[in-house]
Image (tube, rainbow, N blue to C red):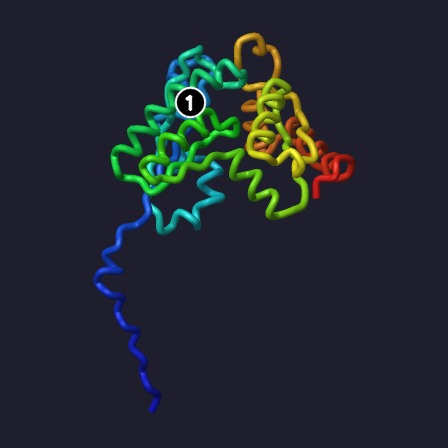
Amino acid sequence: MGVIEKTAAPPAALAAQPKYRFLFIQPFQLPRESRYADPYHSDALTKEQRLRMDYLNIRPLLADVEWDFHGGPVAPYGDWAVETREEFCHVAALRLPIVREACQSGKYNAIVLLGGGEPGFMESREIARGFGIPVTSCAFSQMHIASMLGNRFSVIDFTETHNMYYSDLVVRHRFAERCASIRNINYYHARPGHESVSSIADERDRALRGERSEAVERTVEEAIAAINDDGAK
């Protein structure tokens, strides 16, 4: 007769141990009535929907984590997405009080700042350091992961203005020697002065509908060129 082994129950203290709790903070949000509001950022959506593809990519990592989502400050400069240095400064200053309030609440073990331009990242780290809470952000994390996966990486970006801003982040995070290039597909966020051209959101929606998207095609072309011509590998 076989022996049935019983698995010992975990200690009560271990079973009662609270889960880690993270806070994700968007760089900005636009008013619902904005001409350029993105439906994927609407505050009427669930937190999972607002995190969008990021949630699908990190879903397994969040299985044992409690997490909240903050839509970020309302953009004070206008009703369009952040793109210029001035606009980044505006939303960076307004994101800091959100970070401080989260730290003071005592509810979170870590804070994740969303947005590739990571407005207010260094300042947020300074705030959170006094509370013993780590803060990370998109570009910072992406560069570290890219450097673990290969020898050199390239950035495929969407506008020239944003390219120049992102190049500063590469230098700030000390990845200049690991960054092979920053390549540009030249599509803007929907904003004043660009109403007559297709935006990056328009191209995304075309791709999601299964239609041809020139932005997707350019992205693939630039990615191949980054490998073949720039040495990203």
For the N terminus, give its image quadrant: bottom left
Left or right of 228, for residue 143: left
* Residue in view at x 57 percent, y 11 percent: 195
- Looking at the image, residue 78 lies above or below residue 95: above
Task: Check the image and name the residue furthest to the right.
Answer: 229
Left or right of residue 162: residue 106: left
Q: Nearer the viewer, residue 66 or 163?
A: 163
Q: In the image, is 182 to the left or to the right of 56?
A: right
Establish if 135 lies above or below 85: below
User: What amino acid is at disc 1?
Assistant: Phe
User: Image height check: is 116 above or below 64?
Assistant: above
Residue drawn at x 43%, y 32% is 113
Give above or below for 149 relative to 192: below
- 12, 34: nearer the viewer: 12
Residue 40 appearing in the image: no
Residue at the image position 44 percent from the left and 19 percent from the top: 37
Badge 1: residue crowd in 10 Å (few <14, some 14–19, many ≥20): many
- Residue at the extreme left of the image, as rendered: 12
The residue closer to the viewer here, 14 or 216, is 14
Image-quadrant location for residue 42: top left
> Residue at the top extreme?
193
* Residue 77 falls in image quadrant: top left
Q: In the drawing, does residue 87 fall left or right of residue 153?
A: left
- Give the residue pinned by disc 1: 28
Q: Position of residue 61 (x, y in %)?
A: 43, 49
Quadrant for the C terminus, please: top right
Badge 1 element: loop
Observer able to see residue 179: yes
Q: Position of residue 74 (x, y in %)?
A: 38, 18
